[in-house]
Image: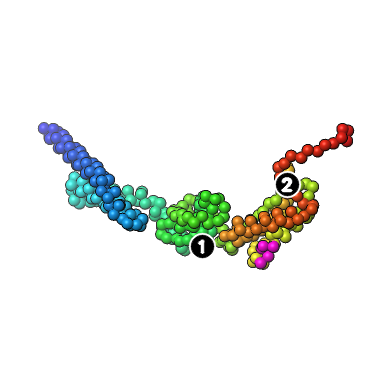
Amino acid sequence: MELDLQQMLDYDKLLSVGFTALIVIFLLIALNVLFKIIRPNLINMGRTKKQRSNIKIFIQIFRYSLSLLIVLFAVLSYSGAGSGIGLFLGLLSAAIGFALQKPITGVAAWLMVVTKRPFDIGDRVIIGDVKGDIADINLTHIHLMEVGGLTGDEESSGRIIMVPNWMLFEKNVIDYTLNNDFVLDSVIVNVTYESNLDKAMEIADLSARKYLAGMIGTSPAAPKVRIDFQPSGIDVQVKYFSPARQLHEYSSKITKEIFDRIKESDDVEIAYPHTEVVFRKKGA
């Protein structure tokens, strides 16, 4: 008899849990449908992009808060006030801790940035595969003025990229301007084997020095020329330290100067793919 009574109590408890779960599921579905209906109308009330964004955020917060209250009410109604609150808070703490792993890591990264100062606002950096100038550093994100972007060069694209702080612990961070405002760049010209190689090296060196003369004293090193054999000619490469935010500007000027000087030279030619037919006498 006692066993039957216990089974009946367990069965009633199971029915109670199932009934409560069905009510919670029904209310959450009804809440979701309600917000889908009213959301477009509320968003249309915003006159500006900022207002519409604020309305979307408010709807999300309100929706999640109501859903949380429904679940809390269900837990308390089933488990009793004291034990229910303790159970709910325990589950909630575990869920929040899991969900906020990366935001919490981001806050730790922010503390590292403001104390260790691995970079400052205005520095040009690469974080993972994102490159740009640091415009702002806040508790959760680093705001970068993107460099390159669709064009793939060192010019500012005009776009802002928000990089989550937690990425600082998981991605490589490259700072262009940590020690100074210069980075190593180069311009390469391929000249023919018949060219005066010494003259070609002189042209490359003088072209770089023409535009970098005023900065050689403050840059890490003066321009230098290196050469390498290639199948169709010799690569003449001038390496120089250029201002990090003007790499493309200076490389473009130096390239133009090298081109103009080679055109004026009689014994230096640029190598390029072409076909040359040479007739020789038989037996020569």
Residue at x-position 19% and y-position 45%? 78
From the top left corner, tell me how far across and down residue 162 is, in percent.
44, 55
From the top left corner, tell me how far across and down residue 52 is, in percent.
33, 54
Q: Which residue is mark 2?
A: 271
Q: Quadrant of residue 224?
A: bottom right
Residue most toward the right?
283
Horizontally, is 48 left or right of 128 in the view? left
Residue at x-position 69% and y-position 62%? 210
**Quadrant where the image shows the C terminus:** top right
Horizontally, is 133 left or right of 233 in the view? left
**Which amino acid is tagged 1?**
Gly
Q: Is residue 265 on the magenta stretch? A: no
Q: Which residue is mark 1?
A: 122
Query: Which of these two is toward me, 94 or 63?
Result: 63
Q: Is residue 117 visible?
A: no
Q: Quadrant of residue 248?
A: bottom right
Residue at x-position 75% and y-position 57%? 202
Q: Residues within 10 Å of mark 1 (few under 14, many from 20)?
A: some
Residue numbers of the magenta segment: 210-214
**Which amino acid is tagged 2?**
Ala
Magenta stretch prevailing secondary structure: helix
Query: Which of these two is toward me, 227 or 214?
Result: 214
Give the secondary structure at mark 2: loop
Give the secondary structure at mark 1: loop
Decide: marks 1, 2 in contact (CB < 8 A)? Answer: no
From the top left corner, tell me how far across and down residue 101 is, in percent.
39, 51
Q: Is residue 139 visible?
A: yes
